[in-house]
Image (tube, rainbow, N blue to C red):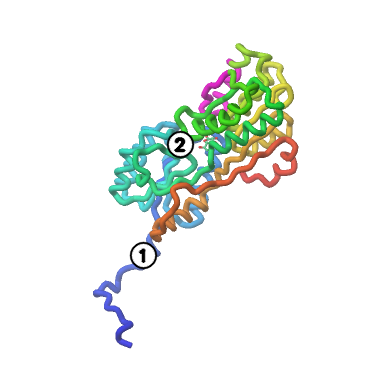
Amino acid sequence: SDKAEQPSGGSTAAAPAAEKKLVVGFSQVGAESAWRTAETKSIQGEAAKRGVDLKFADAQGKQAQQIQALTSFIAQKVDAIVLAPVVETGWDAVLQQAKDANIPVILVDRGVKVSDDSLYTTLIASDFVEEGRMAAEWLAKKTNAKANIYELQGTTGSAPAIDRKKGFEEILAKNPDMKIVKSQSGDFTRAKGKEVMEAFIKSDGKNIQAVYAHNDDMALGAIQALEEAGMNPGKDVIVISVDAVKAAFEAMVAGKLNATVECNPLMGPLVFDTIDRVRKGEKLPKFIQNKDQLFEQANAAQVIGTREY
Ligand code: GYE
């Protein structure tokens, strides 16, 4: 009938919206670890696959550079922003600008502390507190709940450094003979992890019974320092870390790393699915959690062939 025909107001020449490329700005922390490189690749690869115009900005570990990147994405009127925030605090002003411009911000892998949660759309990440708990529980079993532990923290002020410490210490509080003797930041890099471990060895030597590193890269640096000092990581010194990157599996197969808690960096598909949902007007939860599991030497050889990062 005539009723079914809607007048189009004469705009019949307008191109269908679907032909417009989606433009997404991605502000990445940097390239400090194998984990982060895998995350970058996953997001870039998925963007290419879906024909998304991805504007990628590497902040080289500096929050000021991330804020600059976001400011520029907002000025370019991108359709969405993906932000992996280096630290937790200091984002309110720039996120407010994005909100005022109606640009959704998807946080990936690390969370923020803001006065108002509506300043971002959602966070896609692992539960770092739980990762810390898993590491400590495993170590408690391995050492009969008795160990002098040396901790290598991630980047100061970053969500994974704060939360991986918090979860770990929660379990230690129930195990009085497990103590963190020294704890220092190795900034999530292999080089700094090695450097800090060298200093620990110099001052405390044989007192070191276990190393808890907030990521695999730092653990791998620490392993190198221990070996160079004539010690036996994986045997005399128990080493546990987080991420489960390929090199960690190699170190487990070689008997030098004892265990690693997985933290999945392969976020690309989920990130762009999430952006699609936001654009459809769906209401999203504030936290979309990646699930993690622990791997140890005993199953490393079996699993290594299936690892994707
Ligand atoms: O564990 C570490 C990286 O934010 C979850 O950052 C991420 C962490 C990851 O550099 O290797």
Q: Residue at x 38, y 51 (%)?
A: 80
Q: Residues within 10 Å of mark 1 (few under 14, many from 20)?
A: few
266 w.r.t. 213: above or below = below
Horizontal arrangement in the rendering, residue 18 relative to residue 254 (left or right):
left
x, y percent for residue 161: 51, 31
Tag 2: amino acid:
Val
x, y percent for residue 264: 57, 43
Tag 1: amino acid:
Ala
Residue under numbered circle 2: 29
Question: What residue span does the magenta drawing correspond to?
Answer: 182-199
* Near-viewer residue (57 or 288): 288
x, y percent for residue 212: 61, 27
Q: Work out whether residue 188 can be spotted.
A: no
Looking at the rendered structure, the secondary structure element under dot 2 is: loop
Residue under numbered circle 1: 17
Horizontal arrangement in the rendering, residue 147 relative to residue 268 (left or right):
right
